[in-house]
Amino acid sequence: MMLLTTLCIQLLLLLQSSYAFTAPTVTSRLSTTKSSSFIYSSSNDEEFTGFGNVGFLVLAGGTGSRMKANMPKQFLTLSGSPVLHYSLHLFLEKLPEYCAQNGLSPPSTVVLVMDPKYQPEYQPIVDKYNGKLAFANPGVERQGSVENGLNKLVELSKENNGSPCEFVAVHDSARPLVTIPEIESVVKDAQSVGAAVLGVPCKATIKESDDGVLVQRTIPRARLWEVHTPQVVKVEALLRGFDKVEKENLEVTDDVSIIEALGEPVKLTLGEYTNLKITTPEDMDVATAILKDRGDDQINLI
């Protein structure tokens, strides 16, 4: 098992390095409507002042049924700490420290979307970061969870700063390995365009099938991107998008899909293949190996 895990991490890092140099350098447009578009970008040369107008929304309300565990995946132990703690530690400790060292404004607020039955266990952490961290209850679907979290974020921003934050960065707590450079890049791009999402060129060959038995066609891989989180969106646009989705009963699968539905641009920010989503038990093995390779310190939130 250890040999297999080591080989997995070496292959993952090799692929990441390879794609970092071979990703397309031209504008790539992928759309669900005629007017909406993705714009590929790996960097933004505009002056960056920090995260002061950005609120972070951490989604931790999922059940994680594919993990076949006795608890949601965000609470499983990964290298000595719950999966969720890596995201909280990043946004509440590491990112503010990075901002202080580089003369950048830190994140305004972090909202943790969590089932009420788990909130008492995390209340001491909320108390420790008083004014910087707060709970919101999940919705029935992802969209409802994001909407609840966004409403709480706007409310807290008004209380703390006198005005709402301009952007929201929505992050899935099942992605514990996202890095500060990735976060900075996607926030820069969102501040430039209005919406941005981390992503990587798709490595797998994708087949389309109507019945799950016979192949209908092979989709050209050169145009396909696997999107990650955080997804960063202008708050005003996301609120308009929620209204449109509800009125027209649209089906959306992630946060930037709502912006696509408005016909507004979304920037693709080149991320890292190591920003994997914990979905199966095998993902835990790979994530453990990545953390070991990075030599990350132990997390202590309380």
Image (tube, rainbow, N blue to C red):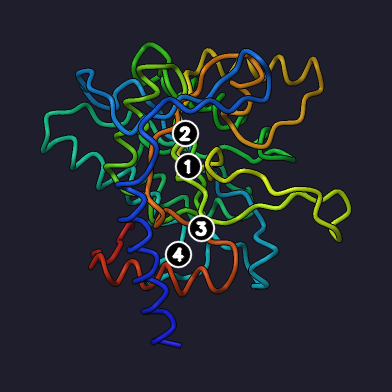
Q: Quadrant of residue 224?
A: top right
Say what secondary structure mark 1 lies in. strand
Say what secondary structure mark 3 lies in. helix
* Dot label at residue 50: none
Of the numbered discs 1 and 3, the one sitting upstream in the chain is 3
Q: What residue is at 65 percent from the left and 52 percent from the top?
A: 206
User: What kind of residue is marked 4?
Assistant: Pro
Check disc 1 and report the residue beneath it: 229
Of the numbered discs 2 and 1, the one sitting upstream in the chain is 2
Of the numbered discs 4 and 1, the one sitting upstream in the chain is 4
User: What kind of residue is marked 1?
Assistant: Thr
Check disc 3 and report the residue beneath it: 121
The residue mark sitting in front, 2 or 1, is 2
Measure the C-alpha gap from mark 1 to mark 3. Answer: 25 Å
Of the numbered discs 4 and 3, the one sitting upstream in the chain is 4
User: What kind of residue is marked 3?
Assistant: Glu
Q: Residue 219's spot in the image, x, y percent?
A: 66, 45
Of the numbered discs 4 and 2, the one sitting upstream in the chain is 4
Check disc 2 and report the residue beneath it: 197
Query: CB atoms at circles 4 and 2 under 8 Å apart?
Result: no
